[in-house]
Amino acid sequence: MKITPLDIQQQQFKGKLFGGLHPDDVDSFLQSVAQELESLTRENATLREQCQKMTTEAERLAQQEKDLRETLLAAQRITEEMKNNAQKEAELKIAEAEVQAEKILADAENRVVQLKNEIQELRRQKAQFETSFRSLLESHSKMLSFNEE
């Protein structure tokens, strides 16, 4: 039997002679109130325990959420750092390649100048050889002509 506060307020006990209450009615009512109060006390304890468990679970989940957020932020920071490092590394490699290309180009230009100088020297030597050879031929030709005469 569920007892409400209104039931308690409206409870009427049969009167005895001389205006007293009937003890069995009072005892029965008190027994019902005690049982209902005991049931409510157990239910209240169970609900408090469930509430405590739910609060603990909510705190655990809130901590997990916080940890996940921190992990996500750390992962984002690491990703950004990795991107920045990769960008810097790429820029460094490009700069190194440009320096190397400039060195190769400068070496090639120096080699071209060197080859031009060698060609010019060979032309000079050829001209000098031709001149010396002609002189030698003329000198031999004159000697031959002189001997023939």
Image: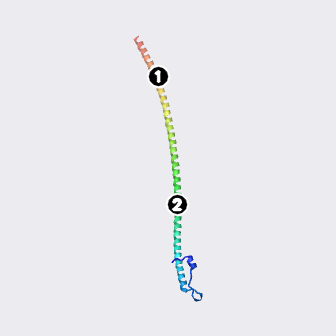
Give neighbour class at mark 2: few <14, some 14-19, many 20+ (Cα, 10 Å). few
**Secondary structure at numbered mark 1:** helix
81 up-or-down from 46: above or below:
above
Residue 101, percent from left and from top: 49, 38
Residue 59, percent from left and from top: 53, 64
Q: Which residue is mark 2?
A: 65
Q: Earlier in the sequence, mark 2 or mark 1?
A: 2
Depth order, front residue of 144/113 = 113
Identify the image's colour scheme: rainbow, by chain, secondary structure or one colour: rainbow
Q: Residue drawn at (50%, 33%), measured in percent from left and top?
A: 109
Residue type for callout 2: Glu
Q: Which residue is mark 1?
A: 127
Q: Residue drawn at (52%, 80%), measured in percent from left and top?
A: 32
* Residue 11 in which image quadrant: bottom right
Marks 2 and 1, how far apart at CA: 91 Å
Residue furthest top in the image: 149
